[in-house]
Image (cartoon, rainbow, N blue to C red):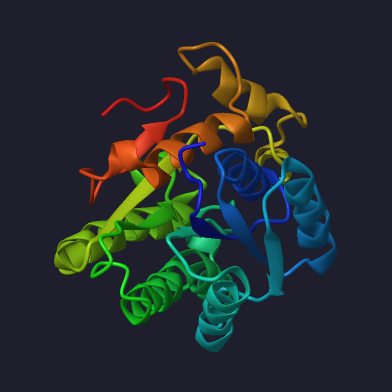
């Protein structure tokens, strides 16, 4: 139980990778604040966390809205008695040719995938300082969702890739700015994960390219060295490491956890 006594906030926690991360951190001993736009989803995950034996609180928020993100972080600290770990997990995908991307699509994508990480970072830093975590000898953690698409720009996923490259840049800059505050900032970069998001990505590829549904997903999975699709639990295991004491001397990094699909 490496996270006993810790409090973690996870955005996009209602399903998929976010749910997997929240449950893993709870199994590691942390109390969890669950944030999402889907109240039913986070309420269900909260029940799972209480069954594990940890505390859980929920807050409905859109991460593209700065005030809502700050309110979510304030709620977490008040409800659970502090904050040690901020996981900026929420995100969406956009599939399509670069030539066809609209201003509205780009604005929404950027607002959630990049602005949401920025607002979460700002809110977490402010709260860590208010709580005087550093003065009390604590290492505070900010953990951001990047992607294999943050290491390699993918065709038909151009703007999405751009947002994930941006997350890597924010992660590096924040790590440099806040090291002296006792805050580490790292990112995790998943690959082809068997979640609802990848179902939608596959469907969109099918619409645009004429491929059969499932064909694009299978093609990507076929390129994974370890020979299988990723699970939310695979990602959560790496986030658990970043959140725990063994990663206290690691900051500014964006680790690939993809089974061997993109090599850097």
Q: Relative to 94, is 39 above or below?
A: below
**Picture quadrant where residue 263 is located:** top left
Q: Can residue 93 be seen at all in this image of the molecule?
A: no
90 left or right of 47 in image: left
Find residue 251 and report its horizontal and vertical position in percent.
23, 49
At x 37%, y 28%, the residue is 262
At x 65%, y 38%, the residue is 209
Q: Relative to 218, is 94 above or below?
A: below
**Picture quadrant where residue 179 is located:** bottom left
Q: Nearer the viewer, residue 158 or 72?
A: 72
240 left or right of 169 in image: right
Find residue 10 and report its horizontal and vertical position in percent.
57, 58
248 left or right of 150 in image: left
Q: Relative to 211, is 33 above or below?
A: below
Find residue 238 and report its horizontal and vertical position in percent.
45, 35
The quadrant of the image that shows the C terminus is: top left
Give the tally of numbered discs: 0
Q: Nearer the viewer, residue 138 or 114?
A: 138
**Picture quadrant where residue 93 is located:** bottom right
Q: Nearer the viewer, residue 249 or 188?
A: 249
Find residue 246 and report its horizontal and vertical position in percent.
31, 36
Q: Can residue 98 be seen at all in this image of the molecule?
A: yes
């Amino acid at each position: 139980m490496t996270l006993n006594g810790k409090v973690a906030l996870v955005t996009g926690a209602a399903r998929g990778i976010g749910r997997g991360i929240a449950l893993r951190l709870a199994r590691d001993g942390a109390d969890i604040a669950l944030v999402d736009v889907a109240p039913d989803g986070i309420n269900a995950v909260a029940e799972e966390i209480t069954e594990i034996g940890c505390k859980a609180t929920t807050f409905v928020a859109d991460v593209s809205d700065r005030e809502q993100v700050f309110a979510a972080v304030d709620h977490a600290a008040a409800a659970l008695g502090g904050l040690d770990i901020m996981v900026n997990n929420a995100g969406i995908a956009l599939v399509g040719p670069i030539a066809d991307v609209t201003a509205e699509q780009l604005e929404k994508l950027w607002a959630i995938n990049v602005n949401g990480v920025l607002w979460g970072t700002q809110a977490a830093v402010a709260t860590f300082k208010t709580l005087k975590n550093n003065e009390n000898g604590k290492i505070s953690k900010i953990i951001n969702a990047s992607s294999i698409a943050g290491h390699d720009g993918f065709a038909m996923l151009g703007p999405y890739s751009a947002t994930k490259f941006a997350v890597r840049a924010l992660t590096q800059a924040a790590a440099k700015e806040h090291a002296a505050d006792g805050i580490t900032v790292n990112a995790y970069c998943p690959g082809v994960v068997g979640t609802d998001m990848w179902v939608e990505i596959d469907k969109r590829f099918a619409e645009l390219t004429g491929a059969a549904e499932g064909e694009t997903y299978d093609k990507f999975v076929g390129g994974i060295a370890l020979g299988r699709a990723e699970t939310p639990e695979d990602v959560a295991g790496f986030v658990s490491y970043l959140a725990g004491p063994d990663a206290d001397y690691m900051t500014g990094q964006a680790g690939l956890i993809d089974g061997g699909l993109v090599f850097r």
